[in-house]
Amino acid sequence: MGAWGTGLYSSDMAADMRAVIKSALRLPFDEDRIVDILRDGERRAADDPGNEDHTTFWLVLADQLEKRGVAHAPTREKAIAIIDRGDDLMMMERLGMKPADLRKRGAKLAELRARLAAAPLLSKPRATIKAPQNYTLEIGLLYACPVKGSNCINPYRGKTNFDGSPWIPDGWRQFVILERGRAFDYLSWYQPLVCRKPVRQKPQLSDAGADLWWVLDTPVTCPQRHFDSMEIAAIGRLPIDMEKAQARFAKRRPSIVHLGWSGRGAAVNDITIANSMHPSSHDWERYYEPNGLLPEEGPTTMRSLGEILAGDLG
C-alpha cells in the first residue's frame, strides 16, 4: 500500500488516483461510465473488500468526484457506508496504524462524510475532450531526442537541472513506434521500441541498423507539448516488417511486455514517453559501458533493428 500518514492521500495508490481521476473526467462520458473505467483500472482494489486498498479506492474516488462537482450516488453511498461501518479504520489498524493516528484519520473521515452527505445531487458541467486526440507519432518512423547521458529533457521542467543550472545535452537516443491506438476511442497512446545505447551525433537513417540494443517498452503517451519540449526529431521511415516484429515480441507470459500490450492504462494515467527516455538502474552510461558489459538479448531486448526490417536501410 505504501501509506506514510493519516490523511486520505497518504498512500501511493491514493496519490496516483487523484491524477487518474482527473484524466478520466476529461472523457465525454456519463458518470457511470467514468466510474466503470476507474474500476477497471484497479479491479482488485475496487471489488475485493479484503484488499488493503479497497476502502482507499472508494473514499478517494468519492472525495475527488465531490470536489470536482461530479454527482455519482452509488459512489457517494458506498463511501458513506465504509465510513459508518468503520471499514477504513479497521483496515488501517490491521496495517499497523497507531491509536492516536487512527483518531486523526477518523476525524478526517468525519469531515469527508459531512461533505458527501451535503453534496449536490446533480453534476456540474465539466470540460471534456470534444474529439479524439491527434496522433503525434507515426508507426514505423525512427525518432530521436537529445539526451544527457541517457536522460532526456524533462518535459515538465525544460532544459534546466534540479539545481537551476542549464541542462546541456551530449547525445541522442532513438526510438521507433511499433503500435499505437486510442483508449476509449479518445486518448492516444503509443508502444515504443527504444534504444538503450545513446549516440553522440544526431542519428541518420542509414546508421539505424547498428548494435544499439533495442528494448520494447510498455505503451506511453506523447502529447504535442511533450514532443516539442523534448525536442523530438523525426529521422526517417524504417522498412519495418510487422510480421517479424509481432513474432519477435510475441506474447509469452502475462508479466513480460509484448507487442500489443494494452495502452489503456498509459492513456488514462498519462504516462509520458519521457519515462522511456530516463535512465534506469541499468543505464548505458552508468552500468554497461563503464563495466564493459552488454545487455542480454531476450523477449523484450534485441541487439539490432535488423531483426525486424523488411529490407536495407539504403
Image: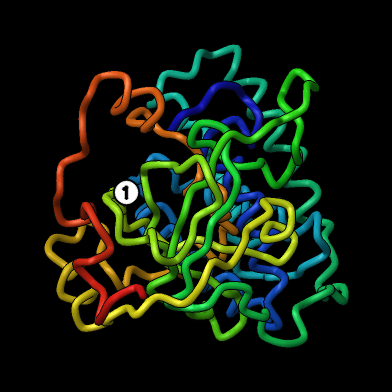
Is the residue 71 above or below the residue 60 in the image? below
- Looking at the rendered structure, the kind of residue marked 1 is Leu
Instruction: Using residue 288 as the reference point, say whether residue 218 is left or right of it.
Output: right
Specify the quadrant of the image occupied by residue 31: bottom right
Pinpoint residue 220: horizontal percent, then vertical percent: 50, 61
Rendering coords of residue 72 (x, y %): 68, 70
Depth check, front residue: 1 or 289:
289
Q: Is residue 294 left or right of residue 152?
A: left
The residue nearer to you, when weighing 141 against 113, is 141
Q: Is residue 223 visible?
A: yes
The spot of residue 228 in percent (x, y) is: 73, 59
- The image quadrant where one finds the N terminus is top left
From the viewer's side, name the closer residue of 276 and 169. 169
Residue beneath the point at 58% across and 67% down: 234
Q: Left or right? Give the position of 272 relative to 73.
A: left
Q: SS of the residue at dot 1?
A: loop
Image quadrant for the C terminus?
bottom left
Q: What residue do we see at 71% from left, 82% from top?
A: 28
- The residue wearing badge 1 is 212
Q: Position of residue 208 (x, y in %)?
A: 37, 61
- Residue 47: name its quadrant: bottom left
- 261 w.r.t. 230: above or below: below
User: In the figure, 21 relative to 36: above or below?
Assistant: above
Q: Nearer the viewer, residue 22 or 288?
A: 288
